Structure formats: structure tokens, C-alpha cells
Amino acid sequence: MTPETRTTWLAVAAGVAAPFGAALAMVPLRHTIDNANVALVLCATVVAVAMTARRPAAVAAAVSAAMWFDFFHTRPYDRFTIDSRDDVVTAVVLLAVGVLVGELALRGRRHWLAAAERSDEITRIHAIAELVADGEPPDYVVIAVAQELRLLLELRDVRFEPGSLWSDAKPLARLERSGDVVIGELLWPVDKMGFPGNEVQLIVQGQGLTFGRYLMARTAGEPVSFERRVVAVALADQVGAAFAGRPANAGGVPNG
């Protein structure tokens, strides 16, 4: 079970338990406060769970709140039966609000994560570009970019091979400048299936020359967003710029 899956299940458990606890705690007060106020408290509990931005947890909290509102706070008490039409409406609204708030929280979290990811990507490119602009040795830039690629793409392993002619036993998948991943002429659905095979190559080029390639290994089946792939290409371009800036372009081989 992945950490993300584990967190989701914990959020679902909280979504089931929190409304139950809140509804049970208000049982001694059910003859002194009206059901509208009880529903507001339960709705606040659902909103709190929904802020985890996990749809299953929000739905679980909404269903749990509606159920325990019915069980503890509508006549006949301690039964899943509602005699009052107003209480039926309140339970339905409670369920609908929980689902809606959960969906809004999920979208908000996605937008926030996307914005944070864009900021991190810009920072990565800027940091490497500064190394190149400061005239750091290409070998140092190679190592720095390898580390950035490892973090950016969540790689298990990454290594750099210099040159332009490699004796591969079979053609490797490659990350193109467009951000696509191809095997031969086949376009691989990276957004759904992740990197294919054991390794994917990312060619390093600059000023019409090929200087080497990164070989990247990632856990199979984990999708890689288009944005991250394009940033990986931009990082490799910085390595190409570092090599191309050396005197006489030592080590470069014309590509194409």
C-alpha cells in the first residue's frame, strides 16, 4: 500500500468516525437544541473532513453525518427511521452539502498542488541555469541535473553516459524534446502507464551536438505528467549548454 493510499484510507476512517462522535456527543442535548443546530454542527464536521481534499473521505463523512443525524436526533430515536418531513429534508441537505464541499475542496487542493509544482519546476530550472551562467564545469552540471531529475521524476536511479554512440542490446524508450516518450515509432501513454521498460533515455544536446544521455529508471506504472517531462528536457538542455560552452566543444558529436 502506497503512502497516498494509506493516507486516503485514514481520511475515510476519520470521515466515518468524526460525524458519529459529534452526533453521539450531542445526544444529551437533543431535548434542548433543535435539529437545525445539530445539522449545522455535523455539517461543520463534514467540512473539516472534506478539507483533506480526498473525495472518498468527504463522501464517507457526508453519509456518516446523515446516518447518525437520523439515528440519534430524529424521532423515533436510536432507529434509522425518520417521522418528520423536515428532518428528512435536513438529512438530505446534510448529505448533499458534504458531497459538494468535498468536491470543491478536492478541486482547490488540485489547483494548489499544481501551482506549487509549477513554482518548484521554475526554481529547478533557474538553479541549474545559474550554474551554467556562472561557468561551472559541465561535469558538475551533469551531477546537479541528475539530482534534480531524480527528485522531479521520482526516479529509482539515474546515470549519465557521455558520447553519442551507444551499444544497446535493444532500442531504449526515449524522452523526446516534445515531452513525449516513444519506443521506436510507438508513442507511449506516459500519463496513464508511466515509463516503459527498465530505463528511459534523455538525450543531451547543445548547438547541434550530442554530448550524452541520461538513463532514468522509475517505478513501473506510475504516471508522469507532461509538465514534469518538459521540465526534465529543459534541465537536460542546460547540460547541453554547459558542454557547448566549453572551448572547442570538446567531446561533442554532431547530431542527426
Image (cartoon, rainbow, N blue to C red):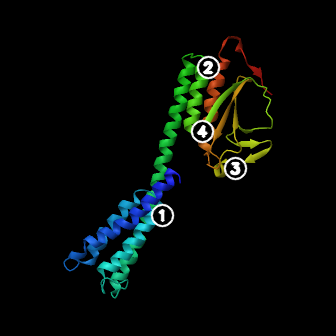
Measured in 3D between alpha carbons, the distance from the residue under mark 3 to the one under mark 4, in whole angstroms, is 18 Å
Q: How crowded is mark 3: few (under 14 residues within 10 Å), some or many (20 or more)?
A: some
Question: Where 140 falls versus 176 (above or below)?
Answer: above
Q: Is mark 3 on a helix, strand or loop?
A: loop
Q: Name the residue under label 1.
A: 56
Q: Mark 2 belongs to which amino acid?
A: Asp
Most foreground residue, 77 or 189? 77
Tell me which label, 3 or 2, sits earlier in the chain. 2
Q: Residue at x 39, y 71 (%)?
A: 64
Q: Residues within 10 Å of mark 1 (few under 14, many from 20)?
A: some
Q: Name the residue under label 3.
A: 189
Tell me which label, 3 or 4, sits earlier in the chain. 4
Please identify, in this view, whether the residue under mark 1 or under mark 4 is nearer the observer.
4
Q: Name the residue under label 2.
A: 139
Say if residue 117 shows up in the picture. yes
Q: Mark 4 belongs to which amino acid?
A: Leu
Question: Where 5 falls versus 79 (above or below)?
Answer: above
